[in-house]
Amino acid sequence: MKFITGSALVALIASSSAFAQTAPQPADDANAADSLIVVTGTRDRSRTQFDTLAPVDVLSRDAVRSSVSGDLSDTLAQLLPSFNVQRLPAADGQAFVRPATLRGLSADQTLVLVNGKRYHRSALLGTRGAQAPDLAGIPSLAIKRIEVLRDGASAQYGSDAIAGVVNIILDDTAGMEAFGQVSQYYKGDGNEYQTGARGGIALGDRGAIVVTGEYDHSEATSRTRQRPDALAFQAANPGLVVPNPVQRWGQPDEERIRGAIDAHYAFADAATLYLFGTAQQGEGVTDFNWRNPAGTSTVYNPSSAFPGFSFRSVYPVGFTPRFGTTFSDYQGDGGLRGELSDRFSYDLSAAVGRSRIAYTLNESLNASLGPASPTSFYLGQLEQREFNLNADFVYRLPVGTAHPVNVAFGAERRRETYEVSAGDPASYAIGAGAATGLAPNSNGFPGFSPSLAGVFDQTSYAGYLDLEWQPVETVTLGAAGRYEDFSAFGDTFNYKLSARFEPIKGIAARGTYSTGFRAPTPAQLNTSQTTQGLDTTTLQVFNQGRLSPSDPLAIALGAKPLTPETSKTGTAGLTFQTHFGLTGSVDAYQIDVDNRFSQSQTFAVPATFANPQRFTAVSYFTNDFDTRTRGIDAVLSYAHRAGPGRASLSLAYNYNQTKVGSGVSAAIPNETQRRIFEERLPRHNGTATLGYDIGAVSFLARARYYGAWTDVTGNATGELFQQFGSIALFDVSASYPFGGHFTVRVGAENVANTYPAEATNQAVRGLIYSRNAPYDTDGGQYYVRLGMNF
């Protein structure tokens, strides 16, 4: 794989505010935030952020660009305490498509929209089988703002909106801007080069065409010690040169090209044609576990099938499989919208999305093939395709009060297709050496065999009604209902009730109650996968199968057909704003999820069962638990002139606790999954952002706090747990405009170079810091960003 070394060019610099919702306004412009119209969680186009019936964070364009990372998931995790993302090095496909969670729920229980339209899922089934969108595929330079609804919204948007909704609004304004950024970790690795440009052309006063392109090249990091067994092997074989380290734990080598387009043209007041979309293409490489010649018997033992041959002639100092991926995504939406009268508007649209991921494995082998084994493999391809049709209407019904009833209604047809394509025959072959104990399949990640390949689909139809009404100036009421029918398992109806009361101007109470659901995807319903791991006690590589719930072996072990996850969500809170720049909100919530989707406990395969893949253990997808998540979100912002400049302060805090109720379909209670649900993420998270602008210079300081959490390490015979304490990370930056069109920003994230405690259960693999941490564990990182706009 080739990586092109980029150079930093030009960049638009982020301002000191962290939120637009909480973005502190100057004292002489205190009502600016109140004038921002919010489009997420409501279909009333007169709602400002302060007016919303449920909490909505609005992240400004400058806030989105304030992170050093080119991955939008990292940016959201830094700005929103209730949003978490893990690094997951050497975790198969999750090293490149990382799971991001809102309010501690599963990654695919948060609905992602672009310009209000559903964004397609990634082809990867990630942590515990979650299949969520890949936010890294959306270029940050193309974003105007991001609205994050922290409330259940299945009645409004359909499946997946249990934890909330992330709505990414693309920038549709004319103008030109470009950026370039270079960054490096304090350790001297992880160099990242980012560059991009956005150009928008106005089509008279009737529309615009905006095109964005970005390039992102990031080099690997390594926070690794030499494995103890590698040191022992080197001592026993002084004539050999063993690499130090034999494997790398850290971020992968990765390269992405991203793009976006947003165009609209009004033929008349009643007809505006629009088109928007995003696309990405990239590749990456990460390391797997080292295979020790002295300890990996399933590779290096002599075999009567291949007399006189040993893989020591191929890999005399062992080998570390290099897992590679090439990926591409695109999403295109087009439609016609307009206002047929002052009271009636419509939006007719179609959308197509696709995620394609192909895997390769180099510096590996299929031991069961002996000397005929290749050392590089094509493992196969995953593909997710979606096609949506939507018809949405809004009618403002006069009812004799000062405000009409906002009546929104519409219908949707959605089709999802998932395809698994087989890899090279050698990647899944079971050769003659298997009968003598040599491992079949490509070592590190078995390829997809024809028995795993296939095309699976699901179609759904939905209709909804959404009402909002302000009977008097101090009260706003809302109600929504949605009926949806799925070809795979039947129909569902969900509803939402909302209310807001503002007895004093600028102070309001709000609350919602809703039901929700998340439908199993075709991939979750139908696919199986074989993975390999390393037992941290015996240091033996083991095969583990994750089977489809319809697989005969899974059924024999207790698997049952998957059903939708269902939820009940209640929120209640207070929000306020003042004329002197102080705003804030406090919201409490409870989310009950029944039939929660997960991976079953790991079962040893009985000797009497047919086991052609030589599984040490197997698991399957299941509706495993009922859970209850309770929490509090608090946000406070203030801005005012201070001395010769302007100061701004934003504070945000999230408390989130999940408790597992009962097992639903598992024959034996799954204690490991219970602990993962309850303890894998911090209960306490917070951010504090302080900005100060003096003249042309802007300074920014941000603190990020993560509470205690629990890590889990899988073994062939069970799981090991380790608890980690809290940690605080600090970021600083300063920016300065010059030449009328340029701005330079310098800064550092984790400026104090803080590291968490070491991961003792994984030390035998050379790993120092847990790969499951909900924050970056590579230490401090500094950067320079140059921007141009005109």
Image: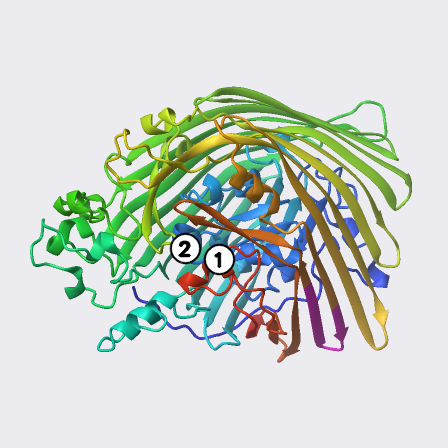
Residue 589 to residue 683: above or below: above
User: Residue at point 35% right, 36% down?
Assistant: 528
Range drawn in magenta = 691-703
- Residue 173: x and y in percent read 59, 56
Q: Residue at x 75, y 67 (%)?
A: 690
Q: Amino acid at mark 1?
A: Asn
The image position of residue 5, as x and y in percent, is 38, 73
Within 10 angstroms of label 1, few (less than 14), some, or many (20 or more) residues?
many
* The stretch drawn in magenta includes residue 695: yes
Residue beneath label 2, please?
Answer: 536
Residue on which disc 1 sits: 761
Name the residue nearer the viewer: 70 or 653: 653
Front residue of this view, candidates 742 and 208: 742
Give the camera-side residue of 333 and 757: 757
Quarter of the image containing the N terminus? bottom left
The answer to whether 240 is drawn above or below residue 353 in the figure is below
Residue that sits furthest to the left in the current view = 307
Q: Is residue 706 visible?
A: yes
Could you tell me how far apart the alpha carbons at marks 1 and 2 are, in whole angstroms?
7 Å
Task: From the viewer's side, name the closer residue of 629 and 179.
Answer: 629
**What residue type is disc 2 on?**
Thr
* Element at label 2: loop
